[in-house]
Amino acid sequence: MSISSLRKRDESFWKRISSLQLLVRHRAEGQAGPWMTRRAGMSLEFAEYREYHPGDDFRYVDWNLYGRLDRLFVKVFHREENIPVYMLLDTSRSMAVGGKLSYAGELAGALSYIALKDMNRVGVFTFARTLVHGVPPRGGLSHLHKILNFLEELRPADQTSLRVACEEFSKLPLRRGLVVLLSDMFDPEGYEHGLLQLLIKRHEIALVQILAPEDVNPPIEYEARLVDSEGLAEFSVSAYAVARYRRRLLQYEQELEVFCRAHQIRYKQLSAARPLERALLEDLRGVLVV
């Protein structure tokens, strides 16, 4: 796998994505109302009003609005704070299909740049059957060079175990932060246990499911002999089996989206054929970047 094309992007690409910021929705430790913290290196910026809900801090009620409208509204703030960002990248053999690993590497590199330019610390971890400590979390744009070097050396290998990888990640002595999970999510063991492990550690999760065009629409019209990219078993499939696969894939995607919504995990599916710049500036806006 090579992400050399990311290094070869012209200056206009970096200039356009430099206007983006990572979207972080975590509240500060112990904060139950509008975003607020006393940590150094942080500032608050007024964002909007919303209606008062029981339990909100009365200090943020706008009494002038109450006097005019006879209804309680609280001020909501954006929090500008340096937070750790962890790229968790699937490098299992299924990611070799359709250039998914290459695409995920480019996306991880671009998102790392966006985070680093805003003085956040970024670490990169990869996983297949187990977790690999790739690049420790550091800050500063000079750190991007190490990240890109690491991503350029990635090769797909082994089977997927999101459960084991997330368990191992959750045991690391890391500050809670934003975990950006880049994967096709093709794990026979399922995804629920692994994602819940990250939530138990109070990490914020943004899941980007990357699929190849042939994942969605296998180019099989009659019958074909296939090899499982991870299990390496061979089997025959017919056009009828492909139709069943498409229905099951759609059901799986819907179940994954429902699970993410129920657990406040941000979720977006991307095609590995989608131009990277359009994915960043359009598809991921409001999900992972603003």
Image (tube, grey):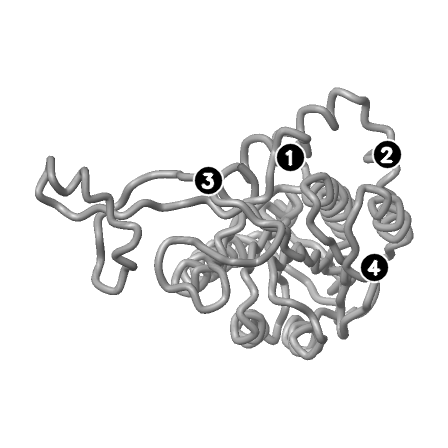
Q: Earlier in the sequence, mark 1 or mark 2?
A: 2
Residue drawn at the location 79% of the way across and 22% of the way down:
11
The spot of residue 155 in percent (x, y) is 87, 56
Kind of residue at disc 1: Arg
- Quickly name the residue at label 4: 135
Kind of residue at disc 2: Arg
- Quickly name the residue at label 1: 274
Label 1 element class: loop
Quarter where residue 107 is shown? top right
Q: Nearer the viewer, mark 4 or mark 2?
A: 4
Q: Nearer the viewer, mark 1 or mark 4?
A: 4
- Quickly name the residue at label 2: 7
* Disc 2/disc 3 C-alpha distance (Å): 34 Å
- Quickly name the residue at label 3: 45
* Disc 1/disc 2 C-alpha distance (Å): 18 Å
Instruction: In the displayed orientation, state which residue is furthest to the top.
Output: 12
In the visual, does 67 lie left or right of 126? left
Whether residue 105 is situated above or below residue 203 in the rendered picture: above
Residue drawn at the location 41% of the way across and 45% of the way down:
77
The spot of residue 214 in percent (x, y) is 66, 46
Whether residue 72 is situated above or below residue 55 in the rendered picture: above
Kind of residue at disc 3: Glu
* Disc 4/disc 2 C-alpha distance (Å): 18 Å
Residue 129 appears in the picture as rendered: yes
Q: Earlier in the sequence, mark 1 or mark 4?
A: 4
